Amino acid sequence: MTYQVALAFEDGITRFIKVGPRETVADASYKARINIPLDCRDGACGTCKSFCESGKFDGGDYIEEALTDDEAEAGFCLPCQMVPESDLVLQIPTTSDVAKTAASVYESTLTEIRRISETTYAFSLEVDNREELNFLPGQYVNIEVSGSEGQTRSYSFSSGPEVSTVSFLIRITDGGLMSTYMRDVAQVGDRLNFTGPMGSFFLREPKRQSLLLAGGTGLAPLLSILEKLVGMDNAHPVHLIYGVNTDTDLVELDVLENYTARIEGFSFDTVVGDPNSAAAKKGYVTNHFEPQHLAEGDVDIYLCGPPPMVEGVRRHLEGEGIKPQNFYFEKFALAVLPDAAPATEVAAPVEQAEAVVARAVTEYEIGEEHATFQAQFDARMALELAIVELTMGRLTEQQLGEFKILAEIAGKTLDGEKFVNADEFTVTNDAFHEFLFTCVGNEHLLQAYTRLEVPAIMAKVLRQEHWIDGAVDKDHLDIVAAFEQQDITAARTAIIAHNEHAKATMAAASKELNK
């Protein structure tokens, strides 16, 4: 019997191969011209060691040095020896580029555009050679926006992997590239190309009950997961909590209701953030966790929503002392900048900022501790000053609201000049600083930011008992206020001041540690 094996690479690219009877995964991969890591081919070196996310297989013959019994028990495997006994999902320890492969490009026809609320559209694509498109429920693709000269936007499938016509949800944002196309230009019959599938957020083999958490159009990948569950023999309960900002943001409730009849043990709740909502349940999704949803940690959680929601759930679980068996999440910005800066405008800030980052990374590798954190924080400031030039006046009301929430979440981990929780501050502070880089839609700047070691340095140095400059919390709020007022001078001033306050905090903490 032939089985389908998903090879999930470290850069988020997933490739699917067919593996025949008594054929190893490695042989099938190379037959498909996908060069996964491989050396000895006889289970002696461990070069190809990978992790099996789901499925059954015969592990084959190998020696202890290549794969220990503990590793095998934990789910690790050797593709050069393993023979599938079901469909598999494997995490391959390399990038798709190293494996000399890439995401596939598909051509399709737009077959349906539906306005399902004031803020949300649904659209469907009929894919040429549909039988060649495989994806895991929860994954996304990059769809080329018609007439945009190759610009793409990422959308998760809202349909299941076996459905013939694939579907997506899109939140309409004034000035958004795909939003403008779908609302004002798109016509049934338009041709659209997309690349994928991508992402590590996908349904694993159910081994216990699941809690699905959706924020806004983060519902899409969870709908894909639910569609997959329809055809599975799953004896475990599945509960979905779907959170939105306003009543008009609630969509596809009839679809969810239908799943309660099609999936045994499935239930769902809706939660609306607006205090004036007519909904029975208001606030955050975490306000409506019930003990049976979390099962004292014996639960797999799948969450797709904006960064504040992800951080809020994570903090809530930690606060309750609950560590789920698995916590899978997909963060997304509510919208990329609606009026994206042209390439010529972006180029100079990117080059300047990347040069600062490169210098900071070098200093971090070879310098003294004090000098290294100074260089890292100065590099972050340089990047933020560059990002201000590209984002000021371009954030939507939703993005401004999200930015403010991130500042407030970080503030809750502080009490004047003391930490309420130093570890949580490091995480929430990073989410705040990263936010503008996720909005600008420029991959170079985002990668430049993520190359910095600021969060790692903070985690290494900051302790609960350490002093923090009391201005840090106010700085975050001042930066947000400057964006709300579209005051670029105030934003730059606040960012520069914040950098000094952050470095003062780090200097004091380093001094304490070195006593």
Image (cartoon, grey):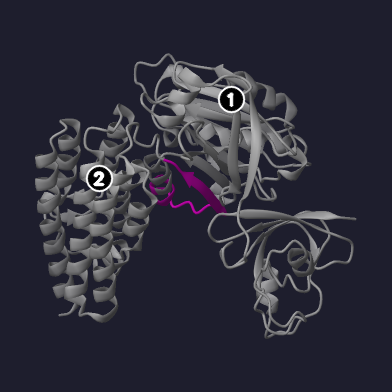
Residue 439 showing in the rendered view = yes
> Above or below — where is 358 with respect to 168?
below
Report the side of 20 relative to 32 (left or right): right
Provide residue 187's location: percent of width, then percent of height.
57, 19
At a point 51% along the width and 25% down the height, the residue shown is 270
Residue 470 showing in the rendered view = no
Report the side of 342 relative to 268 (left or right): left
At a point 25% along the width and 47% down the height, the residue shown is 387
Provide residue 82's location: percent of width, then percent of height.
78, 69
Q: Which residue is mark 1?
A: 123
Of 301 and 172, the residue lying toward us: 172
Provide residue 402's location: percent of width, then percent of height.
32, 36
Q: Which residue is mark 2?
A: 412
Residue, far top: 278
Residue range highlighted in magenta: 315-332
Report the side of 101 relative to 434 (left or right): right
At a point 24% along the width and 52% down the height, the residue shown is 349
Q: Quadrant of the N terminus?
A: bottom right
